[in-house]
Amino acid sequence: SNPIVLQVMRLSTLLGLLATAISVHAQYQQSQIEFWNALGHEHLQQKLRWKGPTDKGPKNVIFFLGDGMGLSMVTAGRVISAEKAGRDYRNQKWSFEKFDFSGILKTSSYDFHTTDSAAGAMALFTGHKVEQNTLGRLPGFGETCAHGDASHINDGIAELALAKGLDVGVVSTTRLTDATPAANFAKGVHRLMEHDSSTQILNTSCTDIAQQILRHPADKFKVLMGGGHGFFTPTPDGYRTDGRNIEQEWESLPGHRTLLHTADDIRKHSVSADDQLLGVFHKSSFNYSLDEIDKEDPTQPRLVDMAMKAVEVLQKSSNTNGYYLMIEGGHIDLAEHENKMNLATAELEEFSHTIETIRRMVGDDTLIVVTADHGHALTLPGYVHKHNSILDAEVETDGMDADGKKIPNILFASGNGTTDRDTYTKEDSMKPHFQSVSAFNTTWGAHGGEDLGIWAQGPYSWLFSGSMENTQMAYLIKFLLCLDPKEPTLCGMKSGMKNTEESNNYATGPTVAALRNDSASSGPPTALITVLAVIAVTASLATVALSILLLRARKPNKVDAIEMNGKA
């Protein structure tokens, strides 16, 4: 009944409610693209203080994504590749490591520290952080598609590029319905809703991913090439139970459209100015490159074949506004999931070769950026001598091997690789499908949550240096291609700088005015955050003060002591 105690209890309740409100508000903020754009805006301002926007921007952007290509994979693959080639120097650069600028990319999704490929790709291609396993859907809308277009993300690079009049292309060694390629066009779905009879799509009103190539934006893409034939075609040869052949329906859409199914189709195809290509070359995802290399007449093209054809089509297009092209090396990730480093390295070699080939095909008006969507829980335990194979278990332990067994030179945290370090030999480690040691035996190796590398070459490639969120990749590409009317663009900035005496003052002059554009009204409500923070601090100080008063009020004086002794 002490009034001070009651006041403290009420204040504690108020503080609890306030803390909950602040937490909910912060989470809500992160579901809005404005929160992430504000981080991109801050990064952009920092870079433009160093160098102003005096150069011409890129006409074209090619985005290379190495799925699962974490820095441990870049390093391990580099060493394995050198070993197999007999090079004593183990750190020869991949083609993209020779680019002018590099940076570090954070990878978490909206709701997980370690992202999956869907949420990772959505951040990279749209600038939105989304819930794990979702494509084209804002956070908080559930998995039944009951909210329709209201839940859809419609301001990705691909949509905005089409609206600006650019051509768009997507190339992958995975299924076109898989997470990374589908992140460029799929709306409102779980990533596993790849065809009409997938388990996830049952009892929902969702449109399966394969079917979505028939509608905006994918129906306008200049190039779509990858795998997944079975997801577009009916049973018994395909997986669809609705009887539809999505590939044929695509072919019958307006325009000059060409459907390709084999590597020979790519070689024979003669590009015309108005071509739209759909290439579907495997029933599911592609075979590993090492499994295809010994075939006398492979029907499946390789990544470099598709990438070259895509660039050829985009370069010969009658559209002179430029293009955006996404090229994914998707099987680096798949091989790591299986703990198969020989396969992963071969996929990385092909990815690097493709990048170098395309770099030679394009001009100085093309920006090339290279990164990954996530890494893997993969490490290189020390200390192995450089003349020993990194695939073996020959680590110099310096007495650290308490159980007396060999320590593997490459270790996955999880997967279905062996957990017995005594069972494999050096000869085993040379086989394409050799599985490295995993610490925990699981059916599938887990992703890693570490930061990733970014490498960039071409106009304004210096913007892609430093440490940034994965959402900032999309933000910077939108900025350079002048895509988003709600956000700052290079075009608006350069226009605002014309005929001004302050054009060299990038920190305080018209550059900042151009940077602010409409973003001041659309960014995070920082005023509200400040008010809540002041309230929280004030309430905390009040709590401390009242607690002191309470302690003093409860401290027994001499009279209290006599009374208590008397009662005793």
Image (spheres, rainbow, N blue to C red):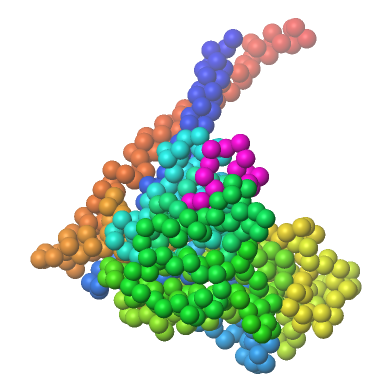
Residue 46: tell me if it is visible: no
- In this rendering, position of residue 179 left or right of residue 484: right
Q: Nearer the viewer, residue 441 or 286?
A: 286
Q: What residue do we see at 52% from left, 19% from top?
A: 10
Can the viewer see residue 247 in this picture? yes
Secondary structure predominantly adopted by residues drawn in magenta = loop
User: Residue 483 falls in which quadrant of the image?
Assistant: bottom left
As drawn, 493 above or below 24: below
Q: How many marks?
A: 0
Tell me the residue at 38%/51% (across/down): 155
Asked if residue 42 lies left or right of residue 22, the reply is left
Residue 107 picture location, percent across and down: 53, 58
Considering depth in this image, is 443 or 537 the residue closer to the camera? 443
Res 323 → quadrant:
bottom left
> Magenta stretch containing residue 211, yes or no?
yes
Location of the N terminus (image quadrant): top right
Query: Residue at position x 50%, y 24% from top?
Result: 14
Query: Is 208 rendered above or below residue 535?
Result: below
Residue 353 location in percent, x, y? 53, 82
Q: Is residue 247 above or below residue 301?
A: above
Q: Quadrant of the C terminus?
A: top right
Segment tinted magenta in the rendering = 196-212
Q: Write the residue at 50% across / 76% down.
A: 266
Residue nearer the viewer, 147 or 298:
298
Relative image position of residue 552 (x, y in whole percent): 56, 22
Q: Is residue 434 magenta?
A: no
Residue 366 image position (x, y, % from top left): 35, 75
Closer to us: 478 or 468: 478
